[in-house]
Amino acid sequence: MLKNAKSLFPVKGMISIILLVFLSTASFGTYASATPEEEGLRIAREIDRRDSGFVDNTASMKMILRNRHGQESKRTIRTRTLEVTGDGDKSLIIFDTPRDIKGTAFLSYTHVKGQDDQWIYLPALKRVKRIASNNKSGPFMGSEFAYEDISSQEVEKYTYKYLKDDTLNGAACFVVERIPADKNSGYTKQIVWIDKAKYIPEKLEYYDRKGSLLKTLTFHDYKQYLDKFWRSDRMEMINHQTGKSTTLLYSEYKFKTGLTEKDFKQNVLKSVR
């Protein structure tokens, strides 16, 4: 999912969404002596620095799935995120509706180095299933988000290249290319547009293993929390190859709620309410 900006879900950003992405205080032209790769990495490190210190957060979410004919199905979800010092964040996603998937829970440990650890509890089977590293490009619960999209987007998981400055929806943006370091990634590259004034992602393009545009994620209706942390209330993921789309609607954000490591143990998957 970018902690919204850093992950698609509120993971040091589902978002961390999610969210996903890179911030900077100046344009590439200011850093004329830097290579595009150095500037891209600098931007990635800056977004990470600016979204650090949230400690933990919770949120409610509605997921709307649409097929290529526009027919919809809806799910209600709760999310919990724990910031981890020295490693990637931990996140827990709990499905409350519809009835046939109620109680499904997804747990993710993002790591700065090596493969992430992910598990999903399926109440119909009454068992916890580990998500294999070679399956993380697969769709998450039938949505247009892959399992790798909803992990915390740690800086070390990509290599970077500043491409250009651009304008999107009236906002001046940096455009940065990032290439996944994980050989099991479903993407050859991702292109991100970052608002220069607010330091938030506006758009993210995903390119498949053949190098073709696969999906586009756009971020809308931002709000700022604790005078620092930006979160998008609405995300739209469109799959250009299938015509399907997924909308995520966030609400009821709370920060520094007192969550601890014990709230993200594997044994909580079967007992979350």
Image (cartoon, helix red, strand yellow):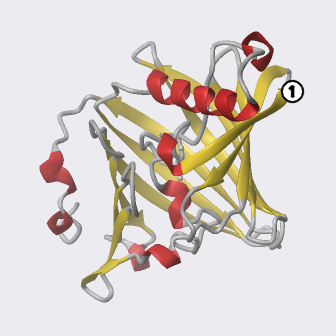
Which sits in the foreground, 83 or 271? Answer: 83
Q: Residue at x 42, y 79 (%)?
A: 100
Q: Position of residue 255 (x, y in %)?
A: 32, 29
**Which residue position holds label 1?**
166
Q: Residue 121 occupies which quadrant of the picture?
A: bottom left
- Tell me what residue is drawn at x 28 percent, y 40 percent: 84
- What is the x, y in percent for residue 75? 50, 63
Residue 267 in the figure: left or right of residue 81: left
Q: Nearer the viewer, residue 217 or 220?
A: 217
Point out residue 181 in the picture as x, y percentages from the top left corner: 56, 57
Residue 26 lies, in percent from the top left, at 69, 13
Direction from residue 103 to residue 233 in the image, left or right: right
Q: Residue at x 61, y 60 (%)?
A: 64
The residue under label 1 is which amino acid type?
A: Asp
- Please indicate, yes or no, whether residue 168 appears anywhere in the rendered image: no
Residue occupying the point 51% across, 71% down: 136
Quadrant containing the C terminus in the rendered view: bottom left
Q: Is residue 179 above or below residue 244?
A: above
